[in-house]
Amino acid sequence: MEYKIAVLPGDGIGPEIIAEAVKVLDAIAVKYNHRFLYRYGLIGGAAMRQGLDPYPEETHQVCTEADAILFGAIGDPLYDNNPDAKVRPEQGLLAMRKKLGLYANLRPVKMYPELIHLSPLKEERILGADLLVVRELTGGLYFGEPRELRNNGTQAIDTCVYSVDEIERIARVAFKMAGLRRKKVTLVDKANVLETSRLWRRTVTRLAAEYPDIELDYMFVDNTAMQLIINPARFDVILTENLFGDILSDEASVISGSIGLLPSASIGDHVPLFEPIHGSYPDGAGKNIANPLATILSAAMLLRTGLNLQAEAESVEEAVEECIRQKILTWDLNRDNPAGTSQVGDFVAGILQ
Ligand code: IPM
Ligand code: MG
């Protein structure tokens, strides 16, 4: 079969980790007799450095014409420490999410037994941790209006706004995902304080009646931050709004030992996007030290969720597991004898040959 994949390397380590994921996809194409047609697009600082918008129209075209999008990372120090900048690279990612209607962000957190000792948490606490953060991605404080400086720059306002429709569509994703897992959804909010959170509770509680085999419980976000450290295994699916999901998914990621291992999928009504959850790690750019596994695992999610290629996705995941067993790992996971970014990609692709 032939598939169109939009490839957006982005900033920092983005191009290097994407190159390794493409290497792995190429190996899958040979093994399973597919053709992947890659079209590349600029985004973020990489686009701005060419004098373009952080999400240029050309890139949007490439995305809308693809079957799935593989994205690297965004963020460029050139634009970071200037709060007065009108345009910043991150706006490219936000614009892409909004324009492509990518409202559901799925961030699975999985333990690898061989790496359990690398977790900052004690082994007995994290044993059995296997959770999925379902983060709302196109609403809340990230997009609410008004958002502006006021009173000659002495005051600033952001707006958190959610509608029942927005909550329902993401809640359905969470209930469906839970149905494929351990059948439990925890709605994370701040309903003791926020009106939006209370709307989430009412809406999700009502919707839960349509999913009688799924257990629903509720947790405040501050408590969740604590429970993720004390007892992460209690969670199956965490359903939450945009900003809480951003924060909690970074926190949850280190349970597994490195943020460099975690893939994600962003899904909407059209073309889905797959990306590692980590950032652009500018200090590591161009040094062949960044961990490509999160991007390679994002390519696996792309195969499974984006192109409906189950066996292909499993092959990639098994190859990554083998890579971990053989300790072919970058320095974040192997201080003593670190492999380079390209070496890890070569190893995974090699297993698939
Ligand atoms: C993420 C990132 C983005 C976000 C940034 C880069 C805008 O942190 O995907 O989690 O906040 O959503
Ligand atoms: Mg984040």
Image (cartoon, grey):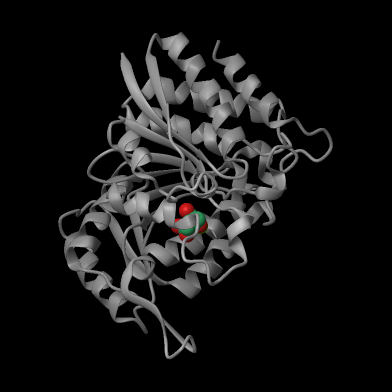
* Point 51% across, 34% down: residue: 297
Quarter in which the C terminus is drawn: top right
Residue 209 in the image, given as x and y percentages of width and height: 16, 60
Rendered position, 243 above or below 30: below
Indicate the position of residue 172 as horizontal and vertical percent values. 23, 53
Q: Residue at x 60, y 39 (%)?
A: 112
Residue 194 in view in this figure: yes
Q: Quadrant of residue 250?
A: bottom right
The answer to whether one can see residue 133 in this image is no
The image quarter in which residue 331 lies: top right
Q: Quadrant of the N terminus?
A: top left
The residue nearer to you, when weighing 79 against 13, is 79
Front residue of this view, candidates 314 and 232:
314
Q: Is residue 53 above or below residue 314?
A: below
Name the foreground residue: 192 vs 166: 166
Left or right, 337 with respect to 325, comes to: right
Q: How many marks?
A: 0
Residue 307: where, in percent of width, then height? 32, 27
Q: Residue at x 82, y 33 (%)?
A: 337
Q: Would you place residue 92 above or below residue 313 in this image?
A: below
Q: Position of residue 162 (x, y in %)?
A: 26, 70
Asked whether, in this view, residue 77 is left or right of residue 172, the answer is right
Quarter of the rendering containing residue 343: top right
Which residue of the protein is positioned furthest toward the right in this rendering? 336
* Point 47% across, 66% down: residue: 86
